[in-house]
Amino acid sequence: MSDISPAISRFSDLANPTRFLALSARLIPWLAAISAVLFAIGLYLAFSTEGDYQQGDTVRIMYIHVPAAWLSMMCYTIMSMSAIGTLVWRHPLADVSAKAAAPLGAAFTLVALVTGSLWGKPMWGTYWVWDARLTSVFILFLMYLGLIALNRAMDDPSKAARLTAVLILVGFVNIPIIKFSVDWWNTLHQSESIMRLDGPTIDAQFLWPLFTMALAFTLLFFTLHLMAIRNEIWRRRIAAQRRLAARMAAREE
Amino acid sequence: MTALFLRDLKLSVRAGGGALIGILFFLTVVAVIPFGVGPDLKLLSRIGPAIVWIGALLSALLGLDRLFQAERDDGSLDLLVMQETPLVLTVLTKCAAHWTATGLPLVIASPLLGLFMNMNETAIGATALTLLVGSPAITFIGAVGAAVAVALPRGGLLVSILVLPLTIPVLIFGVSATYAVVEGPQPFLPPFLILIALTLFFAVLGPAAAALALRNTTD
């Protein structure tokens, strides 16, 4: 295997679950610690800076709501990349990654929906409107639940993984719809104010706490994702050991 | 391909009235609504297009699990996967046959239900037209769900849960095009063209994804 480039061989090294377990065991404490520190800084900044002149203190909901919404989409993107990994390269950890990410994505989407709803009541006067972005994020939540249900409905993990991967890729059409829904349809939800070509229109005073919180959330996600992958690997090993033990017991009789 | 199309069509028409049951379900769903919201004719004519669309969507989902299940049961699915014609084309043909057998009757039945909903002629025409171009998209999306669910022992309910979120854009643009004709200051053409675009887009994506899923279930 001398002809493959070092980058690819490094990537395929990770396909060995034992190596992955060793690497992730070293990574997780660091990721968790940095995430905790960032959360401390971000929350301190979020509560020490002034409220918005118009929205008052409720603007602080943003520091939870926006990172959760970002992560709900990033998690689906990671699941889609894992799905490609499952279908194209049959990477043994890709389907574990997709399976582990789905409940996390559902949780972050739920957080984004709930905080958005709590923010919407004082700002828009209603908990829920059928606006383009709200609806498309709600659909995303339903899709996460459907994917989890589909994955659990089958016994054979590799078959379940490949079928779920197909559906993940089909469902990816929703992500650009969510991203651009506020630009395409002029509705109640405010339009994009951070990832703009002409620079963020949001005040720097809000941008820094938001940025810190987003980074903290992202690292939290990766910590939880790695831990979930480890759990899934162990669970499969235990299942394999059980099958082996059962076979041995059957032979002895 | 023509042979497969005709075979599927004959099967679904003769095998215990798949199309008929779909229409009956459609009728029942639409007939239940006035009991729920009250027999106010003005209100009914206002929400009529939406109700007809939702009814059609639900009854289109009803027959979806039959799309590959029978072939799976008698083993001919493996032959379809192994034959020389690309599986994507086979799936596309099966979708077309399925739509002709279950979707088209819904479109034809929709004017009658529009009358029940006290809709005027333009509203009925617009609903039927949007259903005609929009309902194939539902079949193509549903094919993915049906292909994924073949491996499941009882996948019917799961198909609906997986497919419904993906069909929401079709529903949105179908209903908004109809409303544009009936009430709106908004023009009819943009949502209608988006509806056609959705159908064409899913005509490409749906069979490809369904073929991928089928290949993965059989090996």
Image (cartoon, coloured by chain):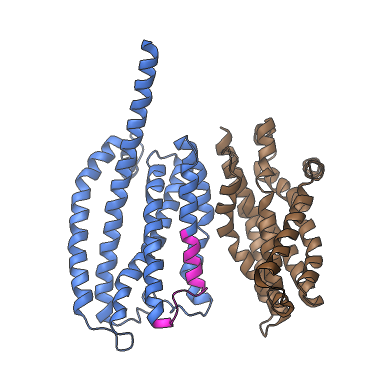
Chain colours: A blue, B brown
Q: Nearer the viewer, residue B199 or B182?
A: B182
In the picture as drawn, the residue positioned furthest to the top comes out as: A253
Q: Is residue A188 above or below residue B111?
A: below
Which region of the structure is painted magenta? A123-141
Percent coordinates x, y for residue B118 in the rendering: 78, 75
Magenta highlight on residue B171: no
| Number of marks in picture | 0
Image quadrant of residue B203? bottom right
Quadrant position of the C terminus of chain A in the picture: top left
Direction from residue A83 to residue A63 in the image, left or right:
left
Residue at image position (36%, 34%) is: A236
Q: Main secondary structure of the magenta part?
A: helix
Q: Nearer the viewer, residue A14 or A224?
A: A224
Residue at image position (75%, 52%) is: B102
Percent coordinates x, y for residue B121 in the rendering: 82, 76
The answer to whether any part of residue B132 appears in the image is yes
Direction from residue B9 to residue A90 in the image, left or right:
left
Percent coordinates x, y for residue A60 in the rendering: 28, 76
Q: Is residue A209 above or below residue B94?
A: below
Q: Is residue B43 above or below residue B137?
A: below
Percent coordinates x, y for residue A13 in the rendering: 31, 38
Q: Is residue B88 above or below residue A69?
A: above
Direction from residue B33 to residue A29 in the image, left or right:
left
Image quadrant of residue A125? bottom left
Magenta highlight on residue A125: yes
The answer to whether any part of residue B101 appears in the image is no
Quadrant position of the N terminus of chain A in the picture: top left
Image quadrant of residue B128? bottom right
In the picture as drawn, the residue positioned furthest to the bottom comes out as: A53
